[in-house]
Amino acid sequence: MDFSKLKRQVILKGGKILDPIKNTIKKSDLLLENGKIKALGKINSNKSTYLMDCKGLIITHGFCDLHAHFREPGREDKETLESGSMAALAGGFTRVCVMPNTNPPMDSPEVIRYIVDRSEECPIYIHPIGAITKGQKGNELTEMGTMLSEGAVAFSDDGLPVTNSAMMRNALEYGTMFDVPIINHAEDLCLKQDAVMHEGKVSTHLGLPSSPDLTESNMVHRDLSLTDLTGGRLHVPHVSSSKSLDHIRIAKRNNDKVTAEVTPHHLFFTDDDLQKFDTNLKVAPPIRTMSDQKALIKALKDGILDCIATDHAPHTIEEKEGTFDLAPFGMIGLESCFGAVNKVLVKENNLNQLNLIQMLTTRPRKIMGFNNNLLDIGVNAELTIIDPNEEWIFSRTDIRSKSYNSPFIGQNMYGRVKYTICKGYISVI
Amino acid sequence: MKHRHLLGLKDYPAEDIQSIIDMAFTFKEVLERPIKKVPSLNGKTIVNLFFENSTRTRISFELAQKRLSADTVNFSASTSSLKKGETFKDTAQNLEAMKIDAVVMRHPTPGAPLHLTKYIDAIIINAGDGTHEHPTQAILDMTSLHEKFGYLKGLKVAIIGDISHSRVALSNIYGLKTMGAEITLCGPATLIPPFVEDLGVNVNYNVDEVIDWADALNVLRIQRERMGGGLLPSIREYRNLFGITTERLSQHNKELVIMHPGPMNRGVEIDSSVADSDQAIILNQVLNGVASRMAILYLLLGGKSDKGKD
């Protein structure tokens, strides 16, 4: 990946512009000046402009990820805000929300301020998600109001579910004052016990400790009911099971404050892929069955799931090359996201390309209240340029993260991010 | 042999299982001789790598190796030392550096032997990986059944006890299914894994019905740690519902072969009087264990240049 400052005047020539707000794809050139969008339409070049050939490519909004772990502060050996930014750019992401399970956790206005300040120096926009409870311990609410004014955009205790229903109620209720999304990792830890995978035919074959889909859907159901009770705003992260979708489907009928995301890996893999005991497929919530996978794809098409989020979770090779019980949960996902979801959804399941792009751009931005008018004249360019039909194999060299715990390595991909433009920089894949 | 390693009996070919059983009978004959040693694996080095305590399996393997004239090294590592820092990879690569031919490994984690194949070139034999598989135990069980009945196809085998936490059960299911036997699992519902019918077995919670049906009972150990943990109420309750007691067997007027992989909890899952009775072949299983492991080692490491691939 080549990363450099944008030339003063750049013409993106001969591509198609996919506008996920207007629902249009049309041929158009695009002129950038000093990192801002200057003009659209047919644009002629002159001596001072730098020409970028975009023939056959699609130009659209930069992708936005609602769920990533950049490990800073605390585990800079796994990822930093800089290395995470480079991984994001390689995957076409210009805006990333980072989870608070750092060390110290993002549970105070001071740590939120630290992330916001550090992000200024990074080539993408990074937004911290604050912890719901102090120390992610589930006992005391954090200073949500003050954290919001320092730059937090949502609240979550990340991998630690808010088990105490009264605390979850309080968080949703307190959050109504700010109309801010509360994100709860839904896993009933009592039912989960020491499970490392989904309970099903495959877990019985492998003898690995497992937990059923109810582990997730029970807590999703509780959270949805509490959202009804409180009028709060709930965003359900990384939905993995058909049963959870049933609850979300019903809740969404009369509650527009419920949103939900799905990860590329829950769309791409099934529990059958764990037969080789690949620790990179050890994630929470676990990869489930083919029927869950089909339900997730259908739910995306039906709008029950709003957007795609990577749950990019870097871990060191030392941790992941241990045995299955000791390996931590999580995989990286920014770099492989588009090629994977475009393959599963557009190529194999006939989803409209435009819809897919909305799931990566306008829908997540809407959930967080970010500016969505990215193709207006005068805005700072936040653009992703893709080849929608390139067939390629994801490899270790495509990874920009500090970690490379990815089961996508060696997988066939369809569609590829070619350029990402953000904050006056361009990365060329 | 189709596979270079013996990691498990899932998808293990029937003809290879049969070859091992046939060879086990040959070696059993050797074990009856006054001089019980053959030079088959002279010059081969085998490491017994045990990350979990084991007495009988380790001794059985060690004896099998010595009877075949292989050089053996025992390595017992507690997993706590791994947790302290030395990685599995380091241990494996250290072994590899010492130029060994095969590793017999027991490990508490499912999949660990497959994991080991990524790091070293030696032949790997799984001596039990957590709650996953214990293929050599299943092979010795099948050898014992074959010896007793003369066939495996159509044989009715009941496996009784804690199926969920049993690598013996899973390997027996895979192996016996491949060889055409019928299997019924019997135990408390909390200790029968979900979706187990998918493996082509029956589940029946009524042990008396199962006894009426079966040709042989393979009685598994009930670990005392499971008691009172939410899975099982008490030993008394377990004995009432599933215990293989003299009283229970006397109510069924039939000949039945009783097996147990050991170690036994006498008075819990099986009565002493049953374990020591003529219908029990438990000690014969132990002898067949040495013969079967000799057969496995010989067929995987032996002189034949028929190098299989995994």
Image: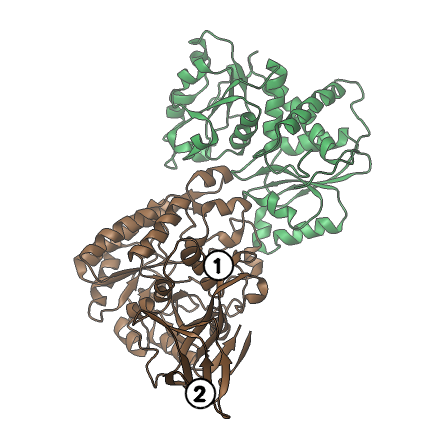
Return the residue at label 1. Answer: A331
Q: Between residues A415 and A34, which one lies in front from this camera angle?
A: A415
Q: Is residue A252 depicted above or below B232 in this figure?
A: below
Element on which disc 1 rests? loop
Mark 2 against mark 1, which lies toward the viewer?
A: 2
Q: Residue B203 appears in which quarter of the rendering?
A: top left
Q: Is residue A49 left or right of residue B310?
A: left
Q: Is residue A55 depicted above or below B164 in this figure?
A: below
- Where does residue A143 sit, x and y in percent of width and height? 28, 71
The green chain is B
Q: CA distance from mark 2 to mark 1?
A: 45 Å
Can residue A72 be seen in the rendering of this structure?
Answer: no
Q: Residue at x 48, y 59 (%)?
A: A331
Q: Residue A235 appears in which quarter of the rendering?
A: bottom left
Whether tag 2 and tag 1 are in contact, CB under 8 A, the answer is no
Q: Is residue B191 left or right of residue A399?
A: left
Q: Earlier in the sequence, mark 2 or mark 1?
A: 2
- Where does residue A339 sit, x and y in percent of width and height? 47, 62
Label at residue A44: 2
- Where does residue B53 sit, x and y in percent of width and height? 59, 38
Element on which disc 2 rests? loop
Q: Colour of chain A?
A: brown
Q: Specify the amino acid type for callout 1.
A: Met
Q: Specify the amino acid type for callout 2.
A: Asn
Instruction: Pinpoint the chain carrying mark 2.
Output: A
Q: Residues within 10 Å of mark 2 (few under 14, many from 20)?
A: few
Q: Between residues B221 and A45, which one lies in front from this camera angle?
A: A45
